[in-house]
Image: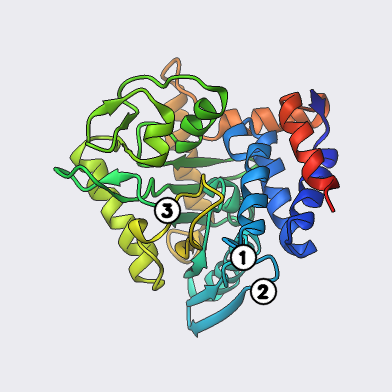
Amino acid sequence: MRMQAQELFRLASLALQRAGARPAMAEAAARHLVEAETQGLPTHGMSRVPFYCGMLRKGRADGEAQPAIKADFGATCLIDNADGLPYESCAMAVEQVLRRARTQGIAFAGVTNSAHVGVLGIHLQPIAAAGMVGVAFTNSPAAIPAWGGRKALFGTNPVAFAFPRRGQDPLVIDLALTTVVRGKIMLAMQKGERIPEGWALDRDGRPTTDPREAIERGSLFPIGGAKGAMLALAFELICAALTGSAIGPEADSFFSEEGNRPRIGQAFLAINPGVLAGQDRYFERVETVVTTMLADAGVRLPGAKRFASAQRTATEGIEVADDLIARVRKLGSES
């Protein structure tokens, strides 16, 4: 079924409110999920609505939570998400780092008592739009074993960067530290499909093609072997130690309605090029890199596919599975 973004936003927001989220929380989450759909990222789009509704109904997320700054010092702050759906908190973090980086040159905002935050690169778009470099980290429920181990310890722990360009879409680098995002395994599980070897391990640390085993009891392969596992460790410490949040094994899976409140952490940074080499020199250097990249046939700029999809769906609408839309409609109509 092909639908317009405005209608998807209405359906998602209504479903989340019916599940217990106050309007501003539901709208912030719905706005992000629809943006993911427009950018051609359905694993982080409308398919998340039923899971978020389940978390709200089962008490894994507090629909009445109000984010607030709990620590504030110079170029840094810490935001307490208070166990809500964290899209308002992330928007607050981005607003804070932008304001502080304008006067301090660089700023850091942590988010604690948080949960699943969707596509990190989407959160960074306002930073790039303001002409600054954005960086974001998050930890997540355990998915990757420490190198040499068999038990999942670190999360998929995505990282994202947004580099503004003058008069062009920003460069957006956005990746998880697993060979495949967990959302793809989740979709395979929903469809009853097997997954390729090399994506996941079972509970005993052996390769598996069973998506349910991978999601519920197993772990995922890190990118780059030991190097990816070390990056997962570093991002775990940034997101958990600096913000005082839960580490991977302390947070139950996002993909189950049952379980605890995740209480993981995120970190957002903004860097102002104007106080370093200067805006003009920054943009010149970025374009030199871009021009050199594109001189090699076959190179595609990171983020280009997302922005092309967003431009296309603005006129053509967004294709969403009929059964998913029916499910979201039902969630929004329940009393």
Q: Please provide percent x and percent y for residue 273.
A: 49, 59
Q: Residues within 10 Å of mark 2 (few under 14, many from 20)?
A: some
Q: Residues within 10 Å of mark 3 (few under 14, many from 20)?
A: many
In the image, farthest residue toward the top: 297
User: How far apart are the two marked residues, 1 and 2, measured between alpha carbons?
Assistant: 7 Å
Q: Residues within 10 Å of mark 1 (few under 14, many from 20)?
A: many
The residue positioned 32% from the left and 38% from the top of the image is 218
> What kind of residue is marked 3?
Ser
* Residue topped by disc 3: 140
Tell which of 93 and 31 is nearer to you. 31
Q: What is the quadrant of residue 48 in the picture?
A: top right
The answer to which of marks 1 and 2 sits earlier in the sequence is 2
Residue 312 in sight in this render: no
Q: What is the image's colouring?
A: rainbow
| CB atoms of marks 1 and 2 within 8 Å | yes
Tell which of 136 and 207 is nearer to you. 207
The answer to whether residue 331 is left or right of residue 297 is right
The residue positioned 76% from the left and 63% from the top of the image is 24
* Residue topped by disc 1: 84
Residue 205 in sight in this render: yes
Q: Assign a secondary structure to mark 2.
A: loop
